[in-house]
Image (cartoon, rainbow, N blue to C red):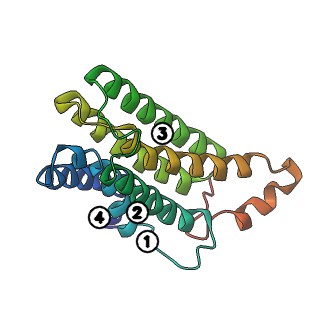
Amino acid sequence: MSFLQHPAFQSLVLPLLLATASMVLLRLAGTRWTALGAALGLVIALTVWPGFDWPASSRAQTLPWIALAGLLAAALAIGLNAPGTKALTRGAGLLATALVTVLAVALAVWAALGGSLLLAQLALMVGSVAGVAGLWAWRSATITPAALAPLVLAGLVIAFAQGSLALSSPEAAGDAAERDDPYYTPQWK
């Protein structure tokens, strides 16, 4: 397995690098657009892995489409100066991004312990880009609620997918491998 295909690279390093690069590039368009860098980094990372498949038949295949829709809605809101596009103060931005980061990491732990390493990786991707947004909020206080909405939406989709796995009955545990995403199913349980 090459380093580029390693799950740690795909779920931690790649989203972190793409979100940082996106924020730096979007800074050229103006400070109000910079806040979308984390969500753009997540969408690009999801494009690389697991990719945009249509029709989206599994949980992993729906997440990139949800993140893309959230990014487009946030960009439209920022472009139209809709409510929720005013930059948060430094303290509020740090608190919001720290909360999203901690919740995404907790979601990754829940997914890993619940048996879906794929959902755990996807949740770590959200946590990684939220951490970059937190660093950016600490540095320049340009985080807006609209820019964090795609990250929260992606986290909710992952939580719903993990919750649907957790609600399955114990006697149906043998069928959980068939309901999980076809990419891989952990064999350690």
**CA–CA distance between discs 1 and 3?**
20 Å
On the image, which quarter does residue 59 sit in? bottom right
Find numbered disc 1 in the image and state the secondary structure of the residue it sits on: loop
Give the class, few, some or many, for how many residues have Cα within 10 Å of label 4's Cα (few <14, many ≥20).
Answer: few
**CA–CA distance between discs 3 and 4?**
23 Å
Residue type at mark 4? Leu
**Percent position of residue 68, x then y:** 43, 62
Question: Reading the chain from its start, which is encountered first: label 1 or label 4?
Answer: 4
Question: Reading the chain from its start, which is encountered first: label 4 or label 2?
Answer: 4
The residue to which callout 1 is attached is 51
Relative height, residue 140 to residue 48 (above, below): above
Question: Reading the chain from its start, which is encountered first: label 3 or label 4?
Answer: 4
**CA–CA distance between discs 2 and 1?**
6 Å
Question: Reading the chain from its start, which is encountered first: label 2 or label 1?
Answer: 2
The residue to which callout 3 is attached is 104
**CA–CA distance between discs 2 and 3?**
16 Å
Give the residue displayed 29% in from the left and 39% down from the top. 133
Relative height, residue 2 to residue 94 (above, below): below
* Left-right relation of 54 to 79: right
The residue to which callout 4 is attached is 4
**Percent position of residue 54, x then y:** 54, 79
Residue type at mark 1? Gly
